[in-house]
Image (tube, rainbow, N blue to C red):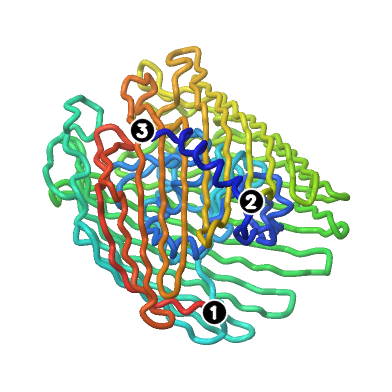
């Protein structure tokens, strides 16, 4: 099914007789775009937000499922829940997206990419996806965008429990419990969760070709287990000073189809412990400081025998000063420090890296216009100094129409593997660099809230393997795209849609020039619908992805596909809900990575106790 056809079919609906539109989110405060709270109405970037209400309505089970159908997002999963998952935002690489948790940076793997597949969604209150370059605020790994995850807080001083249990296809079992509360000065939210699934056969070796899929035949189900814990505590010392301490922990086992060279099970651990202190020194000067430690550990084994292990650790400190120069102008000055360590079976030539950064940002407003100027200088042990910046300008054309333009530079530092691995590393690598341009429009017409973003990104010094399998700064890319979103309510049904058209093109003069970058879709479309009636509600998601290629040579084509999900909800009694989710309703067969299977039609029955204050 063509996404262009669906989008054209949707236009008459969006332009139909006006009825009450969805409540706008113009008063929503966005944090990620400026490292401080700012109203969504003043944004100079393209941002999507997934709320707790969205997660509950559609009964999302993983972080990647919650963000997969947002504009500009491509997901490549290798065989189901808990399996290796790559994220591509606006056609950039999987290590070109910065992941934050409550304002601090998460630890990444030795390849420089986050392990999204093990982050427990049940403890998450809100997800902000900021598209476009943000290295001027967050440093490396922000070429494509930034994702900030916020864990749950207490919404009331009264002691409030939440729980859910569920059972589904592949003998999937889940149980989650949390409790929150506090008083006028102190609040807390503590939760624990468990999920296990027998899974399905991730890869059956049907490609029969070396280096495609798992190139093995292990006709078994590949199971997954995840045990997790979240703690989020806040305390207000005075009217001007408060502290937050948070802990997100998950561990478990994931099975996969390996080969004669690697194992078939990984024992994993992810742990992030952080603290944030906010203090208002004067009415016009406030300080925010953050301190955290993150760990990503994995131990690979085959048939019960250890094969290898990798432990990554990130220590992070940040200090930010915000100065209110007048009613509409904010100046931010700050310092970031990162210390990354690795301990692995493969003896790396170097196992530690330090990065120091100084950043500044000026956000202002005059009349109906807004502007933003940001600059950051990073000093890294390996590649020295690197400077990035952003400039943006927005104007409220009318009460119903807003426009903005922006330009930004960004970079991604080479990973531990590329720099120091004993097998084909290159310690002389330079960071991958980008320049991006964007024009955005948003408005409300015909009782429809809509937004449009047009962008172009040039990436230089892409790190690729040469003919001797040594990483080199030899590739280039140009990525163009258009992103459109619309929200409308018709006869009590809430519709939410997005259409993405992209040209992620390889511009390298060495090889594959003009080809589509691997595993990036050239178009995608999502249509969400939600309707409540009495004790019942129904949510549906139609998700269409266009053609992709699994390799840089564009010799392996991944066919387009469309999936349909349905979620029915019945309120048994007050605050107690019974949900049935049927995913991939029409049993669509498709691949996100060549040679790896995806799940067919599947269901999850779950019971939820959700007091909403």
Quadrant placement of the N terminus: top left
- Identify which residue, 488 or 240, lies in the foreground: 488
Element at label 1: loop
Q: Residues within 10 Å of mark 1 (few under 14, many from 20)?
A: few
Mark 3, Cα crowd under 10 Å, few <14 / some 14-19 / many 20+, is: many
Q: How many residues crowd mark 2 within 10 Å: few (<14), some (14–19), many (20+)?
A: many
The label number, if any, that marks residue 613 in the structure image = 1
Asked if residue 180 can be seen in this view, the reply is: yes
Badge 2 is on which residue?
449
Q: Earlier in the sequence, mark 2 or mark 1?
A: 2
Figure disc tally: 3
Q: Residue under circle 3?
A: 560
Q: Which mark is residue 589?
A: none
Q: Nearer the viewer, mark 3 or mark 2?
A: 2
The answer to which of 464 and 468 lies nearer the viewer is: 464
Instruction: Kindly report which numbered mark, 1 or 3, lies closer to the viewer in this rendering.
Output: 3
**Residue 428, can we see it?**
no
Q: Report the side of 430 relative to 425 (left or right).
A: right
Under circle 3, the secondary element is loop
The spot of residue 141 in percent (x, y) is: 54, 41
Q: Is residue 173 above or below residue 413?
A: below
Q: Is residue 474 left or right of residue 1?
A: right
Label 3, label 2: how many angstroms apart (C-alpha)?
Answer: 29 Å
């Amino acid at each position: 099914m063509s996404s262009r056809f669906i989008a054209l079919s949707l236009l008459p609906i969006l332009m139909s007789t006006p009825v009450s539109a969805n409540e706008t989110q113009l008063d929503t405060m966005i944090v990620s775009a400026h490292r401080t709270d700012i109203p969504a109405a003043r944004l100079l970037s393209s941002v999507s937000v997934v709320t707790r209400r969205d997660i509950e309505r559609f009964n999302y089970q993983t972080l990647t499922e919650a963000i997969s159908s947002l504009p500009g997002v491509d997901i490549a999963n290798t065989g189901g829940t808990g399996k290796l998952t790559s994220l591509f935002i606006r056609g950039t690489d999987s290590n070109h997206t910065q992941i934050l948790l409550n304002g601090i940076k998460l630890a990444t793997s030795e390849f420089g990419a986050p392990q999204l597949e093990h982050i427990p969604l049940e403890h998450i209150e809100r997800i902000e996806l900021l598209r476009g370059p943000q290295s001027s605020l967050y440093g490396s790994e922000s070429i494509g965008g930034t994702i900030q995850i916020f864990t749950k807080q207490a919404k009331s001083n009264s002691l409030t429990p939440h729980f859910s249990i569920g059972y589904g296809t592949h003998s999937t079992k889940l149980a989650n419990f949390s409790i929150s509360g506090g008083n006028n000065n102190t609040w807390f939210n503590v939760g624990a969760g468990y999920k296990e699934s027998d899974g399905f056969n991730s890869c059956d070796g049907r490609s029969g070709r070396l280096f495609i899929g798992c190139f093995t035949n292990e006709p078994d189900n590949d199971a997954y287990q995840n045990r997790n814990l979240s703690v989020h505590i806040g305390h207000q010392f005075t009217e001007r000073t408060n502290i937050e301490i948070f802990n997100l922990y998950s561990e478990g086992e994931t099975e996969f189809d390996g080969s004669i060279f690697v194992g078939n099970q990984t024992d994993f651990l992810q742990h992030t412990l952080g603290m944030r202190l906010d203090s208002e020194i004067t009415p016009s000067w406030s300080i925010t400081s953050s301190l955290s430690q993150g760990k990503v550990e994995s131990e690979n084994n085959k048939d019960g025998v250890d094969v290898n292990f990798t432990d990554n650790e990130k220590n992070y400190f940040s200090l930010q000063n915000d100065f209110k120069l007048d009613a509409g102008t904010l100046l931010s000055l700050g310092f970031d420090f990162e210390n990354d360590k690795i301990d692995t079976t493969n003896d790396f030539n170097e196992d530690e890296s330090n990065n120091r950064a100084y950043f500044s940002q000026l956000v202002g407003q005059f009349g109906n216009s807004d502007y933003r100027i940001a600059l950051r200088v990073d000093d890294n042990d390996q590649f020295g100094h690197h400077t990035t910046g952003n400039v943006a300008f927005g104007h409220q054309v009318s009460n119903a129409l807003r426009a903005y333009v922006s330009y930004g530079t960004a970079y991604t530092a080479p990973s531990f593997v590329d720099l120091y691995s004993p097998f084909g590393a290159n310690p002389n690598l330079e960071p991958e660099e980008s320049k991006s341009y964007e024009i955005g429009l948003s408005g409300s017409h015909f009782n429809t809230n809509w937004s449009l973003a047009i962008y172009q990104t040039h990436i230089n010094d892409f790190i690729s393997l040469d003919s001797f399998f040594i990483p080199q700064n030899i590739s280039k890319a140009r990525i163009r795209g258009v992103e459109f979103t619309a929200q409308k309510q018709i006869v009590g049904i809430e519709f939410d849609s997005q259409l993405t058209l992209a040209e992620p093109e390889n511009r390298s003069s060495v090889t594959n020039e003009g080809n589509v970058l691997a595993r990036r879709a050239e178009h995608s479309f999502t249509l969400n619908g939600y309707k409540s009636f009495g004790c019942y509600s129904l949510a549906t998601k139609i998700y269409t992805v266009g053609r992709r290629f699994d390799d840089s040579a564009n010799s392996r084509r991944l066919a387009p596909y469309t999936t349909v999900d349905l979620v029915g909800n019945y309120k048994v009694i007050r605050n107690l809900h019974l949900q049935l989710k049927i995913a991939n309703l029409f049993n669509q067969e498709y691949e996100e990575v060549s040679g790896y299977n995806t799940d067919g039609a599947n269901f999850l029955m779950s019971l939820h106790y959700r007091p909403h204050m």
